[in-house]
Image (cartoon, helix red, strand yellow):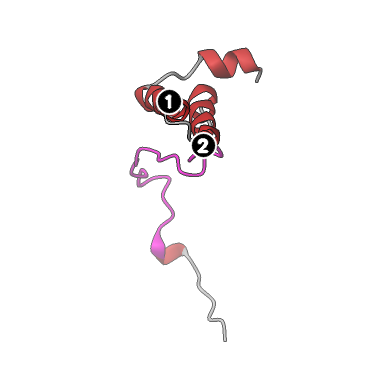
């Protein structure tokens, strides 16, 4: 993936909110001369711009549940369990 693909694809409302919140934090930090808060503001804005953050590794993606068909499902009585001591 290149940077252009990341910036232009996958736009959604949560991404726009993160970017807008980051810009808001940066602007308010400069207005109130609280320059330490510029760093978190820039980080939140970059998270929104690059679509990275909370679940960027893809580990919290939820799939739609699809019940298995009976033909392809392994029947419980066919499974052999071994007792571990």
Q: Which element is circle 2 on?
A: helix
Majority secondary structure in the magenta region: loop
Against 76, residue 57 (above or below) is above
Apparent side of residue 79 relative to residue 84 in the rendered image (left or right): left
How packed mark 2 is, by other alpha carbons closer than 10 Å (few <14, some 14-19, many 20 or more), is some
Residue ID at (44%, 39%) = 61
Residue 82: x and y in percent read: 54, 77
Pick whichever, 43 or 56, lies toward us: 43
Q: Which image quadrant: the N terminus?
A: top right
Label 1 packing within 10 angstroms: few (<14), some (14-19), many (20+): few
Real-space Cα distance between discs 2 and 1? 15 Å
Q: Which residue is mark 1?
A: 31
Range of the magenta residues?
53-76
Quadrant assignment, res 62: top left
Tell me where residue 63 appears, x and y as whole percent.
40, 39
Q: Is residue 7 above or below residue 42?
A: above
Determine the secondary structure under disc 1: helix
Comparing labels 2 and 1, the label whose residue is closer to the camera: 1
In the rendered image, residue 81, in percent from the top left (x then y), is placed at 50, 73
> Outermost residue, front direction?
33
Between 79 and 40, the one nearer to me in the picture = 40
Q: Which mark is residue 70?
A: none
Q: Which residue is mark 2?
A: 40
Q: Is residue 43 above or below residue 70?
A: above
Q: Quadrant of residue 6?
A: top right
Left or right of residue 28, residue 3 in this image: right
In the rendered image, residue 49, in percent from the top left (x then y), is placed at 51, 22
Residue under the point 40% across and 63% down: 76
Q: Is residue 28 magenta?
A: no
Residue at 40%, 58% (x, y): give it. Answer: 75
């Amino acid at each position: 993936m290149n940077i252009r693909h990341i910036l232009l694809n996958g736009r959604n409302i949560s991404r726009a909110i993160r970017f807008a919140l980051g810009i808001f934090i940066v602007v308010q930090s400069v207005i109130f001369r609280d320059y330490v808060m510029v760093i978190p503001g820039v980080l939140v804005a970059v998270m929104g711009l690059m679509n990275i953050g909370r679940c960027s590794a893809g580990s919290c993606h939820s799939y739609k549940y699809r019940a298995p068909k009976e033909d392809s499902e392994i029947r419980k009585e066919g499974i052999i369990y071994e007792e571990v001591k």
